[in-house]
Image (cartoon, rainbow, N blue to C red):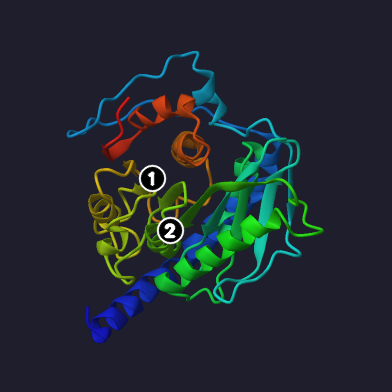
Amino acid sequence: MSSGRAAAKTLLFAAFCLGSVACADERSGDESQEVSDLLRGDGSDFDEGASDVGDQAPVLALQAGDATAASLDTNGPHKVASYTQGFPRGKDHGPVTVYYPTDRTDPLPGVVMCPGYTAKQSSIAAWGPFFASHGIVLVTMDTVTTGDQVPQRARGLTQAIASLKLEGKRAGSPLNGKMSQDLYGLSGWSMGGGGTWIATTADATLKSAVTLAGHNLTGGGAGISRGSKVPTLMMNGADDTTLLGGMGQSSGAYDAIPATTPKLLYEMSGEGHFSWGTPRTNGNASGRYMMAWQKTYLEGDASFKPILLVKGPKAAAWKTNLTP
């Protein structure tokens, strides 16, 4: 792509974001308020209905008494704490918040999550207690500026995950002596999702990738996912039809990821670009599939994989190469 075309797309992206910022801020406020609710472990029923879409891997039915499925629709069993001081700051990311379980005794897995264009880490704060209560450290990061582009977000994610690994050895860190040696993953919303595609394609040692309304059109297109060996879940909304996260960006990324890499694309009816700041989207489906993916691929617990074989509620599109 020429520099002129890339610049034009970036400006168009900015126009969409700035035109939607009031809506985004309103939703972010609601989602930030949910953090205290998440710490209490409140949950709600989910919608089992889903539209029928073709070209699917086998779809299994969850049993009514499936405790693992129900457990992912609300907070997990672990107590949660967080900190913001002492974590090294990379040159391509801003301040972070580290959410962690205080009572898990085995080595802790960890994930870094990046927000979208014009957004701050407060927009994804509700994911922190959710992850930590399920036994996974989550680092939510700010970017250097809210206008950072996809490649810089990829570098920021890479730097933050390297720092998270070192938290297990840093004197004075609440995670000193507690972090896993190799169980790490990345996640991101919008341009943060684009950064996730780039960073995980470059680092095959990572165990999981999850993108939320991922954006790649101003960051190199679907090809940034080509060759990825990291199991990747992509969630996006059917109502997200613009340059922000629509126009087939997640579908293109799915197609670019090799067939030998576990992958799943879940497009939800009735959801748009600003639906992804909480695990409660679509009757808790966003949290259920996010955490089932992390348990299966980040932690290597195959008992959660059957959840990923169930077509999600209100699925406008569902593509996967997963098999029982």
Can residue 47 be seen in this snapshot? Answer: no
- Which label belongs to residue 203? 2
**Residue drawn at (37%, 32%) of the image:** 313
Q: Is residue 212 left or right of residue 114?
A: left
Q: Residues within 10 Å of mark 1 (few under 14, many from 20)?
A: many
Give the label, 1 or 2, closer to the camera.
Answer: 2
Label 1 to label 2: alpha-carbon separation: 12 Å
| Tag 1 secondary structure | loop
Q: Where's residue 163, x and y in %?
A: 63, 62
Mark 1 touches mark 2? (CB < 8 Å): no
Nearer to us in this view, 104 or 129: 104
Depicted 203 relative to depicted 47: above or below: below
**Residue drawn at (56%, 75%) of the image:** 144
Depicted 165 relative to depicted 259: above or below: below
Residue corresponding to mark 1: 231
Depicted 303 relative to depicted 261: above or below: above
For marks 1 and 2 on the same chain, the one whose residue lies earlier in the sequence: 2
Q: What's the amino acid at mark 1? A: Pro
